[in-house]
Image (cartoon, rainbow, N blue to C red):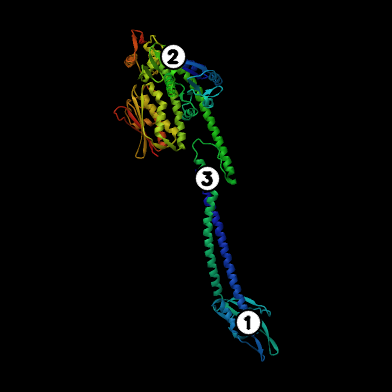
Amino acid sequence: MRYLLVEDNRELADAVINRLALDGHAVDHAPTLAAAEDCLASASYDLILLDVMLPDGDGREFLARKRAHLETPVIVLTARSQVSDRVGALDQGADDYITKPFDFSELEARCRAVLRRRGGSARNQIALGDVLFDPLAGTLSRDGVTLDLRNRELRLLEVFARHPGQILSKGQLMDRLFSYDAEVTENAIEVYVGRLRRRIDGIGLRIETVRGLGYRMETARP
Amino acid sequence: MKTTGSIGRRLTLLLAGVAALLSLLSWGMVTTLARQAAERTQDNVLAASATTIAETLRSEQGEVRLELPYSAFAMLDAISQDRVFYRIAAGDALLTGYDDLPVPTAVPAPGQVVFDTGVYSGEAVRMATVSRPVVAGSQPVQVTVTVAQTRHGVGTISAELSRVAAILSVAFFAVAVGLSAVAARTSLRPLNEIAAAVSRRGPSDLRPLRRDAPEELAPLMTSLNRLMERLGQSIRRSEDFIAEAAHRVRTPLAVVRTQAEIALRSVGDEAEKTRLRRIIRAVDESSRSAGQLLDHATVAWRADDLARAPVDLAELAAQTAGALEATAAMKDIRLHLDTAPARVAGDAVLLENALRNVLDNAIKYSPEDTAVRLSVRTADGEARIAVSDEGPGLGTGPAEALTERFRRGDNTEGIVGSGLGLTIARDVLTAHGGRLEFAPAPKGRGTCVSLVLPSL
């Protein structure tokens, strides 16, 4: 997935870019509307994250201007939680909005929801051996058999799928799966991994326990 | 606002006063003229009668002879049934008639008629006197003829005319009062139309009034429009200021939060993790409280002058659920929608905000991997959105207390909240003539919060 982040605060932008990169997304950063124009002219994006207040103008006005010939879904980053502002952003063609400061997990969840609503695309599918994983639709398919996954199973599988063959520690998985304040222990990871194992067993995917280190996903050899 | 009388009433009263004055004046004039006309008629007849009598005087053998002509009295009878008196004297000697009839001291010149008013036998009489020299013997004698008549006829005629005039005047006055009221209302209609046009507007509609108005109202329209423009500018300025301030505060907060979150992922020490969690929580609390305070103020402002457009709660529920789906998915919470069309009249933005607060609460307090159910129903003239969760319930204490400002349940420890969410929801519903209801969820676990509104 290729994202465009239009945000003038460098630290915030870096943090968001790093976080989204963990999911395997490439993020271009535009600190101004002018830079955003250039990016949009030279590349195509799957999703735009747009701050409303930028040094060279109002993000919502930019959106209203661009919307007519812009297919890409847009999530507005707003500083106001006021009702009128939210409604205004949606009226002007934003697909969703998120209020600063935001939780990374929530940002990810909103990106995923918007992309799913917009219908995703085939190029986002990940081949795990001969199993086709569509992280947006939340489906696994093999030989015409399709399996639906629940949100957290899907997130877990996505983390494994992005790092094929790598060992992932419980801590790493926890960070990706839960919001900072979720009261979970590493045992919860064991529960979720166990649940995911049972779900995907039938389709030929296996998650291995590497004693003392974590887990690793192996795709079944044909 | 204290009202100081009514322009319409004042205008009506003023016009009615003028009409009353005119009626009185015209009645007075008609009465006077009628009396004068009646009196003139009587005078003419009296003069004719006296002249006729005087003309029959002749001298015969040195004596003045008189033959009272019938016609002289018949003409007097013609105008009324008043009593008639007469006195004919040659010099000081009475020829015939009533000797004690008061006569004018000045003897009129020949050919002239002198009129006088006096009292005879207890009644007011009008008298006409003529004189004529009659040659009786060697000396011409000045004979005076006085004819008098009581004035009942004149009184009756003028009273009759005056009565008719009074009736006409009263009728004129009544019609004039009616027309005054209509005129007052008609001339005030443009003012009422402007007032209606202003009050029909939504709370944030500050466009200038564009409508045709009479010349006299143009200054009012102009200053009203100027006021709205200034108000709009000042609202925009304060909105811009709030937006700018929020942006300036929240962006660094977002940096703090993201950096703390990144640090949380990289440190291994539990004590430090706890500290970082506290930082993140404090950031969340502050931003959430600020947001809810703003929402609360917005709700209070919009509820003051509530817009009432038709809103379908089923659509609203679907929309709100859609917006919160991502949040729910983070905890593997499923949102079940079970809706039937339910139309209410209200402010969609406020209602959405109320539902969002209730739904947000339900998601926040629900355990992982549970369901939150939204149902929309209409029954008994009430539309109801019920939000049930499988959470820990409302805790102890009366549920309604949870809608108090900054009040939070006693089992909410560890969950970020401002204590304003349900207050906002309740305020929105109250403004719409509805209410917020709390009940245990139907399945025995969790809470069911209902937003109840009068249905359309």
Considering only vertical position in the picture, is B399 above or below B63? above
Mark 1 neighbour density, 10 Å: few (under 14) some (14–19) many (20 or more): some
Q: Return the residue nearer the eye: A75 or B404.
A: A75
Asked whether the residues under the numbered discs 3 and 1 touch, taking CB atoms below 8 Å apart as contact, a structural biologist would say no
The residue type indicated by label 3 comes to Glu
Q: Return the residue nearer the eye: A201 or B9.
A: A201
The residue type indicated by label 2 comes to Leu
Mark 3 neighbour density, 10 Å: few (under 14) some (14–19) many (20 or more): few
| Residue behind mark 1 | B52
Q: CA distance from mark 3 to mark 1?
A: 76 Å
Which marked residue is nearer to the observer: mark 3 or mark 1? 3
The residue type indicated by label 1 comes to Thr
| Rendering coords of residue B438 (x, y %) | 34, 32
Counting the numbered discs, the total is 3
Left or right placement of residue B274 versus residue B61 in this view: left
For residue B193, the mark is: 3
Left or right placement of residue A146 versus residue B185 in this view: left
| Chain identifier of the residue bearing label 1 in the image | B
For the C terminus of chain B, the quadrant is top left
Q: CA distance from mark 2 to mark 1?
A: 139 Å
Element at label 1: helix
| Chain identifier of the residue bearing label 2 in the image | A
| Residue behind mark 2 | A22
For residue B67, the mark is: none
Residue for point 44% across, 31% down: B296
Mark 2 neighbour density, 10 Å: few (under 14) some (14–19) many (20 or more): few
| Rendering coords of residue A100 (x, y %) | 47, 22
Considering only vertical position in the picture, is B382 above or below B249? below
Q: Are marks 2 and 1 on the same chain?
A: no
